[in-house]
Amino acid sequence: MSGRRAAVVVLAALIALTIPAAAGRGPRDVRAERIIEALLVWRLVDELNLNEQQIARIFPRIKALKELRIELGRRKITLLRELRDLMQQQPRNEAEIQARITELDQLRGQIANSAPSLR
């Protein structure tokens, strides 16, 4: 797969991964998410002219990445809520606040490092 094609695959995967994250902010319409995701996948396969072997190799990895990023996103939301609650408490537990900030920074690093590997 050429560098350009790989870049398109990565871009499409990242776009597909943002759909569930954006939907998680409000009431989720799972059916709408699946339809949009299916359209993105169809467009990607069509645009790249992927054969069956390429599809079988790429999409399980994209799905695993999507699930990882959703889980990391959920954990991030939980950490942010916990941090907000800790900040509102009086007296403040600075050690606990710092621990949550450190955990949040580590989680952000995990999210940044979870870019798809298609090799």
Image (tube, rainbow, N blue to C red):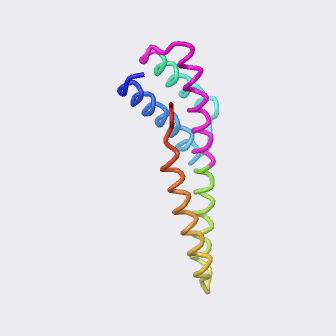
User: Considering only vertical position in the picture, is 90 above or below 35?
Assistant: below
User: Considering only vertical position in the picture, is 27 above or below 80?
Assistant: above
Residue found at the far front of this picture: 119
Which of these two is toward me, 63 or 21?
63
Residue for point 49% across, 33% down? 13
Q: Quadrant of residue 29?
A: top right
User: Considering only vertical position in the picture, is 12 above or below 24?
Assistant: above
Taking the image as shown, residue 77 lies to the left or right of residue 8, namely right
Residue for point 50% across, 31% down? 118
Q: Is residue 54 magenta?
A: yes
Magenta span: chief secondary structure: helix
Residue for point 59% across, 20% down? 56
Q: Which stretch is magenta?
A: 46-71
Which of these two is toward me, 94 or 51?
51
Residue 26 pos. (x, y %): 58, 46
Residue 119 pos. (x, y %): 50, 31
Residue 94 pos. (x, y %): 58, 81
